[in-house]
Image (cartoon, rainbow, N blue to C red):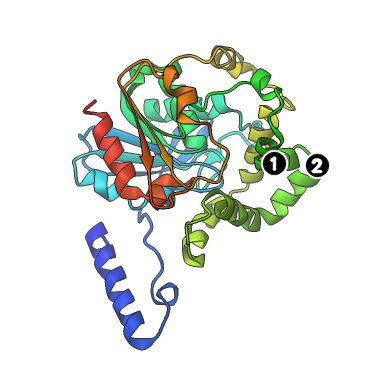
Amino acid sequence: MNTTQRNVFAATALTLAALFGASPSQAAAPATFNTIKQINAGDLNVGYVDEGPANGPVVILLHGWPYDINSFVDVVPKLTRQGYRVIVPHLRGYGTTRFLDAQAPRNGEPAALAADVIALMDALKIDQATLAGYDWGARTADIVAALWPQRVKGLVSVSGYLIGSQEAGKQPLAPEAELQWWYQFYFATERGRIGYEKNHRDFAKLIWKLASPQWNFDDATYARSAVSLDNPDHAAVAVSNYRWRLGLEKSEAKYEALEAALAKFPSISVPTITMEGDANGAPHPEPAAYAKRFTGKYKHQLIAGGVGHNLPQEAPEAFAQAVIDVGQL
């Protein structure tokens, strides 16, 4: 079933639901991606969506925690209709992505996720792409743009410049800001690790609600993404990411040089559009605090209407348009 057929089916189901008294969630499941491809890339066998013309300009969309590729299910068709080839990978620890080595560290440090993107581009023989993402995905896109600018045609980053370091992570914040990071401190404990492994679906649903307080997603929409969090490596990668930020885990040796470069907070020179929702309930910096980090063509957009942390899923039209617009800066 193609995108047009899916939309027609969904509209028909909603009409029947209205006529016969069923709720929309009972009438039809939300649309999802029909085909997930797999490829060996670096340390991973990556599950990814690949839609649009094979010779079109490439866009790589990167999701965050605790979400998945379905954040972009309404963004992708808007881009493919404009002639883009769109790649949407499951990050390490999500969906159908798996480690090739059963003994490899389930490492979630930022440099590892960025290296995964470069490895995927190499495996797919993609020299250059526009990168766009939010949350972990925005941080990963920022890192790739900063360290491998020749591989990035343009950047769309929700919440802007998210590059950090373990040294910066040692600095205490105001109490209100520390409260927003409660889960980071929870993950620092063994109780938190076990708790997330056991309760990751309920935990993630809570994060969705806190991060996007005005987004009234239904159970079917959440369940569609929650399946990706059942990946056997998910909890280990997620906990590793937040423990690394607090300096509780060391970098893997092969990423130490990358992390040292990132600790200097490198500027990003590629054309960039940063975005923010007007109702983002997750921790995020103010645009004025990071604008100077973007030294090339640059634009910031505030998306109104109660848009929270998962901006591409909550405002897919605006997100897709930013991907298109960044190529015209």
List x then y, in percent, for residue 292. 43, 17
User: Where 313 falls versus 221 (above or below)?
Assistant: above
Residue 3 in view: yes
Viewed as shown, does residue 179 lie left or right of 4? right
| Residue at screen point 52% across, 36% down | 136
Q: Nearer the viewer, residue 46 or 129?
A: 129
**Nearest to N terminus: mark 2 or mark 1:** 1
Query: Which quarter of the picture shows residue 174?
Result: top right
The amino acid type of the residue labelled 1 equals Leu
Give the position of the N terminus as an image quadrant. Answer: bottom left
List x then y, in percent, for residue 272. 34, 26
For the residues marked 2 and 1, what is the alpha-carbon distance in whole angstroms? Answer: 20 Å
Alpha-carbon neighbours of circle 1 within 10 Å: few (<14), some, or many (≥20)? few
Badge 2 is on which residue?
190
The amino acid type of the residue labelled 2 equals Glu
Q: Do labels 2 and 1 touch, CB within 8 Å?
A: no
Q: Nearer the viewer, residue 123 or 78?
A: 78
List x then y, in percent, for residue 116. 49, 29
Badge 1 is on which residue?
179
Q: State the SS at label 2.
A: helix
User: Where 151 falls versus 192 (above or below)?
Assistant: above
Q: State the SS at label 1.
A: helix
Viewed as shown, does residue 10 lie left or right of 164? left
Which of the two marks, 2 or 1, is nearer to us in this view?
1
Give the position of the C terminus as an image quadrant. Answer: top left
